[in-house]
Amino acid sequence: MTERFVKHATFVVERTYAAPPAKVYMAWADPALKAKWFSKADIFEFQVGGKEYSKGGPPGGPIFTFDACYQEIVPEQRIVYSYTLDSNDTRISASLTTIELIPTDEGTKLIFTEQGAFFDGHDTPEIREHGTGEMLDALGKSL
């Protein structure tokens, strides 16, 4: 029998963008803008209680399923969502994510905090934190 375990972790990734909070917020709130730096959503309901769902992956690689529910949205200030991530048919994590948008003289400071439960070694907080940094860099390029 395979050993089952959960690794709990919290990580924070910060970026500063030379764009106002309204523009950074729209990059999360508008499905066409978000698809420029994140996987294109099959379902995109950007409202409290709304769902975001996407499925895809690299050619020949695993199929990842992102299934999120928006818990709180404060326009141009905060986005909170919970989500699960599957690799093929295996659930690899469940997380709560908070995105804070803080105006600065240079534009916007984004603080991304993820509190996750990572299952059975299929994913790790370190791998997820690294991927999140790459994702936020892609967001910056899209702005």
Image (cartoon, rainbow, N blue to C red):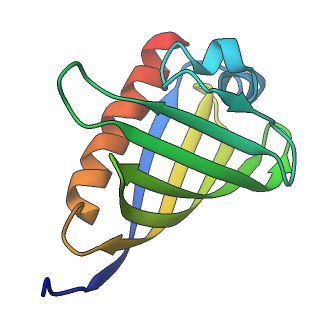
Residue at x 85% of width, y 39% of height:
75
Q: Quadrant of residue 20?
A: top right
Location of residue 88 in the rendering, given as x and y in whole percent from the top left corner: 32, 46
Location of residue 35 in the rendering, given as x and y in whole percent from the top left corner: 56, 17
Residue at x 12% of width, y 87% of height:
1
Residue at x 44% of width, y 53% of height:
85
Looking at the rendered structure, the number of numbered marks drawn on it comes to: 0
Q: Is residue 94 above or below residue 53?
A: below
Q: Nearer the viewer, residue 91 or 107?
A: 91
Q: Nearer the viewer, residue 117 or 12?
A: 117
Q: From the viewer's perspective, is 108 left or right of 121?
A: right
Q: Is residue 51 above or below residue 54?
A: below
Q: Nearer the viewer, residue 110 or 69?
A: 69
Q: Quadrant of residue 22?
A: top right
Quadrant for the C terminus in the image: top right
Location of residue 7 in the rendering, given as x and y in whole percent from the top left corner: 29, 80
Q: Is residue 130 above or below residue 42?
A: below
